[in-house]
Image (cartoon, rainbow, N blue to C red):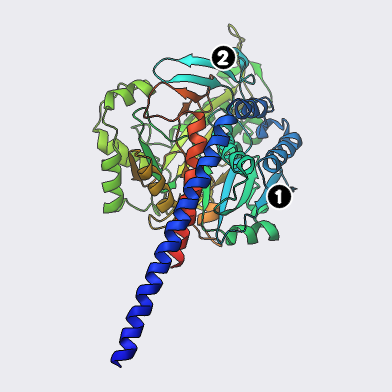
Amino acid sequence: MKVHRRLTVAAATALALTLGTIASTAVARDHRDRAKVVAAIQADRAASIERLRSWIALPTIANMGVNTPQGAEYMRQLALGAGFQQARIVDTGGVPGVFAALDAGAKDTLAVYFMYDVKHFDPAEWSSPPLEGKIVDRPGEGRVLVGRGAVNQKGPEMAFLTALHGFRTAGVKLPVNLVLVAEGEEEIGSTHFPAMLADPEVGAAIRRSVGVMMPSAGQQRDGSVSIDLGAKGVVELQLVSSGERWGRGPAKDIHSSQMARVDSPVWRLVKALDTLVADDGFTPAIDGWFENVRPLTPREKELIAADLPKDEEAVKELYGVRRDEDFLASAYRLASQPTVNIQGLVSGYTGPGGKTVLPGRAEAKIDLRLVPDMTMAEAVEKLKAYLVKRGFDDIEVIVSGGYSPTTSPEDSVIVHAAVATLENAGIAHSLFPRRAGSWPGVVFTGPPLEMAAGHFGVGRGGGAHAPDEWLLIESSKPDVAGYQQQAVMFVDYLYEVARAAQRDRN
C-alpha cells in the first residue's frame, strides 16, 4: 500500500507538472496569436470603418418593409467575408433571418446574436445624412461616426466582425467555434425570430453552444461597464378606437360642429388610456398586472445599489428630468417594475393650423415592458380582459410583436468570460440584474433551450432610435475604448470564453 501510494503521489505530481507545462505553453501561444490578430485589426482600421459605413448605407426597416431581402443577403455576405464557412438565409414567415457557422476545430462553441434591422428616421431631424456615416467631433467624447444603426446595433456588431477579420488575416484559428443567428425584426418585437430557431440546423447549433452573446458598446462616460444579467420583455401593440367599430362615432372624419351630437372616437380612446395607469402617471392599473411580478432578491438589490451612478445630476440632465425622488428607489423601480407606455397618438388632422374635423378613428401606439415572472401572453390577455371589464370592448388591440423578459445566472460561461476580459483590461465593471430596455434573449434563456444569453462590449455610443445616432471611433479619454479597441476586446473575450468553458467542463 505504501509503495502504491508513493507511486500515486509521484504520478500525480508528474501529471500536474505536465499539465502546468501544457497550460503555460497554451497561454504563451495565445499571447503570440493575439498579438498577430491585434496587429491585423490595427492594419484594417480604414477598411473596417468603410465596411460599417457601407452597412449603414443599406438600412433594413422592418415596419416599413424597406430592404428586407437585400438586408438579409448583405448580412449573409458580411458573415462570409468575416470567415464563416457557411451562411444561409432562413425563411421565417416574415423578414428573413441569417444563420452562419464558423468551425475553428475548437472544443467549444459560442453562439452570437445579431440584428440587422434599424429604426426608421427623418433626415430633416439629423445634422448630417443618416445613411452617410459621417465622422465628426463630439465634445467630451472624441471623433464619432453619425448614422442610423451606428450604435444600435451595426457598430458593435461590425466591431465584432472586425475581430474575426483580424483572426482571418493573421492566419490564427479562433479559440472557439461560432454560430451566428441574425434577425431583421428586432425593432418590431422579433415577431418571427422563434421560427428561425425552430429550423432544425439552427436549433441544433445553438444547443451545442456554451451561451449566446450580443455585441454592444457598453461603456459609460467614466469608462466603466455594466454586465447585465437580464432584460425586460416588451410587447408592441396598437389600441384603436373607431366610430365604425364602436357604432357611436362617425365612420369617417366629419365637420367638428357635429361634436354636439356625434360621439368622438378620439375622446373614447383618451378615456380608455387614462384608466391604464394610476394617478401618478406611471404605475400600471390593469387588473392583475402585478400578480406574477417577482420582487427583487436581496442579491439583485445589492447589485443595483453597487451599480448606482455617482452623478445623479448628470443622469437628470441626460434625460431632461427635474423631478426629485430617492435615486436608489427609482433605480429599484427601473429594474423591477413593468410599464405601460404611450409611444404616440395618431388621429385626425395634424398639419399646420386647424381643420375643424371630428375624426372617425384614433390610434395609440403602446409598448408594455415586462419583468420576471410575467409573460407576453399573460400581459396581452390581461390588457384585453381589462378593457372589456371597463366597458371598452370596442377598442381594438392589435399586437405587432414582442417577447417575455430574460434572465441569465451569474455563474455562467459568458458572464465569467465577460468579467475576466474586463478585469484583465483593468476596466471597472459591475453586474446588474436587469436592463430596462429589451432584446429577445428569452428565446435562448427560456424553454426549450434554457441557456445563458447576454451582452458584451466596450466603447460608447448614443442616440439609439433618435436623430444623430453615433458611435465612438476615436476616444478623447484613455479609459474609454474607440472602435479598434472594441474589436480587440472581442478578441480577448473569445479567448476568455474558451478558458471559462474549459473550467466549466472540468
The local secondary structure at tag 1 comes to loop
Foreground tag (1 vs 2): 1
Q: Residue 373 at x, y = what percent?
A: 42, 54
Q: Is residue 262 above or below residue 60?
A: above
Instruction: Kindly identify the residue that appears in the image at 50 percent across and 21 percent down.
Output: 144
Q: Is residue 144 left or right of residue 105?
A: left
User: Which amino acid, mark 2?
Assistant: Glu
Q: Is residue 405 left or right of residue 422?
A: right
Q: Quadrant of the C terminus?
A: bottom left
User: Which amino acid, mark 1?
Assistant: Gln
Q: Residue 391 at x, y = what percent?
A: 51, 41
Q: Circle 2 sits on which residue?
A: 125
Q: Quadrant of residue 328?
A: top left
Q: Circle 1 sits on which residue?
A: 85
Q: Quadrant of the N terminus?
A: bottom left
Q: CA distance from mark 1 to mark 2?
A: 41 Å
Q: Is residue 199 above or below residue 289?
A: below
Instruction: Kindly identify the residue that appears in the image at 49 percent across and 31 percent down.
Output: 342
Disc ID at residue 59:
none
Q: Is residue 40 above or below residue 320?
A: below
Identify which residue, 450 or 268, lies in the foreground.
450
- Give the mark nearer the N terminus: 1 vs 2: 1
